[in-house]
Image (cartoon, grey):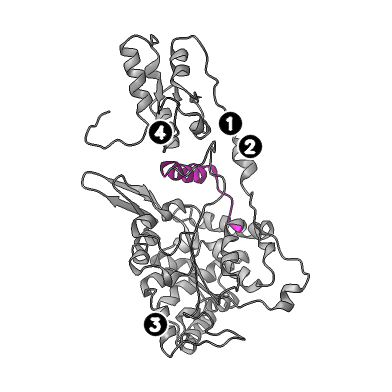
Amino acid sequence: MAPADIRKEGSAYDLTIAVGILAAREEITSKSIGDYIIISLDGGLQPIKGVLPIALQAKKEGFKGMIIPRQNANEAAVVDGLDIYGPESIREVISFFNGKSKLEKIRISLEDEFYNKLCLSEVDFSDVKVQESIKRALEIAAAGGHNVILIGPPGAGKTMLAKRLPTILPPMNMSEALETTKIHSVAGKMGKNIGLVTTRPFRSPHHTISDVALVGGGGVPQPGEISLAHNGVLFLDELPEFKRTVLEVMRQPLEDRVVTIARAKFSVEYPTSFMLVASMNPCPCGYYNHPEKTCVCAPGIVQKYLNRISGPLLDRIDIHVEVTPVSFRELSEVRISETSSSVRERVIAARQIQEKRYKENEGVHCNAQISSKQLQSICRIDEAGQQLLKNAMERLGLSARAYDRILKVARTIADLDSAEKIESSHLAEAIQYRSLDRDGWAG
């Protein structure tokens, strides 16, 4: 139980203590108890949090196997080289150590558990009718790992589009799957008999969420929503409705892709490498710039509504997209839309180009992660491109912070086209994804 100053919680130690007492009383005579990690008890064995990290450490320290609750066994069985047993009661454990009965080893097939489930999803991009320009923007966001905000009236399809973004992201590799599973395991979010998280997480917290629930914390620090979204998507619906303090605490993890939760005697670090997808109405009534309905908000209200989101947070969002409502005529048309799998192929090809480009840069895997210093050498544009960008910034009133974002997005568009250099057409497309930076956008 050492070190004694670290608080213990849950039922993880109960079976260990019980087996130790039984061994001391010589009711268990086996000398091999020390070869196993032994976890959990409550008459029957109860599931616990954090089994996968424990299993990885057990293998590293040379343990032979683990005796854990049956509900957690598949999770630990992901780790090759450990004998995993999942008894349902302490009687089975005693009989096992005394050699009176055998426990069945838990084995899982990584091919069935991981590779065959990589791209399984109940939703698809083809479900979304029309909205081709918005789909294109989300494809660019997925290809470069860019954060994106969708602005539009109620019912325009913002949430529907956001929920389908994970289906076009590249499938997770084994390293990402293990890292994601460890976080969900520590948080107790794995579910019954699930061994490995195989699809990219999609987290969508309500706007009433607290600071601690979003970034993590508590007496015994637990991962928050931004860590549960690691290697996936964090969707914040109705962004201006979130408390200002909640949004502000997210700024540092967005930049550093890690959050540190400090307490008096220790600190915990959780990874937070996620894509932020936010949505919002353009104004409180929802109909500013609507093609058919009239906005009833008083003068200045639209800008005040937008100002609920701080400039530094908007600065970390590369792509702004205006989502317009779809008419009945367009909805009723029979047309074949592109599937997620075909879009994903282009996204994967673009990500492979970026992986090759940044292989010497530790911690950089996609265009959204490059620093301002790297931007100068990676996102060079010719004289015609410089003139186009200058004219756009002057005529549209784009802010200075838009400059870097436009270059990063243009680099991603060029990667989707397999182009070595950023062309004027790539810049022109990137410029249109800066709606909220335009002077007078909100009147």
Q: Is residue 120 above or below residue 314?
A: above
Q: Is residue 113 above or below residue 45?
A: below
Residue of label 3: 304
**Which residue type carries mark 1?**
Ile
Question: Is 176 a magenta residue?
Answer: yes
Label 4 near label 2: C-beta < 8 Å?
no
Label 1 near label 2: C-beta < 8 Å?
yes
Residue at mark 2 to residue at mark 4: CA–CA distance: 23 Å
Label 1 near label 3: C-beta < 8 Å?
no
Residue of label 2: 112
**Residue 315 appears in the picture as rendered:** no
Which residue is painted at 62% across and 68% down in the image? 135
Quadrant in which residue 140 is drawn: bottom right
Residue of label 1: 108
Residue at mark 2 to residue at mark 1: CA–CA distance: 8 Å
Which residue is painted at 66% across and 62% down in the image? 125
Residue at mark 4 to residue at mark 1: CA–CA distance: 18 Å
Residue at mark 3 to residue at mark 1: CA–CA distance: 55 Å
- Dominant SS in magenta: helix
* Disc number placed over residue 25 in the picture, else none: none
* Disc number placed over residue 54 in the picture, else none: 4
Mark 1, Cα crowd under 10 Å, few <14 / some 14-19 / many 20+, is: some
**Which residue type carries mark 3?**
Lys
Badge 1 marks a residue whose secondary structure is loop
The residue nearer to you, when weighing 307 against 155, is 155
| Magenta highlight range | 168-187
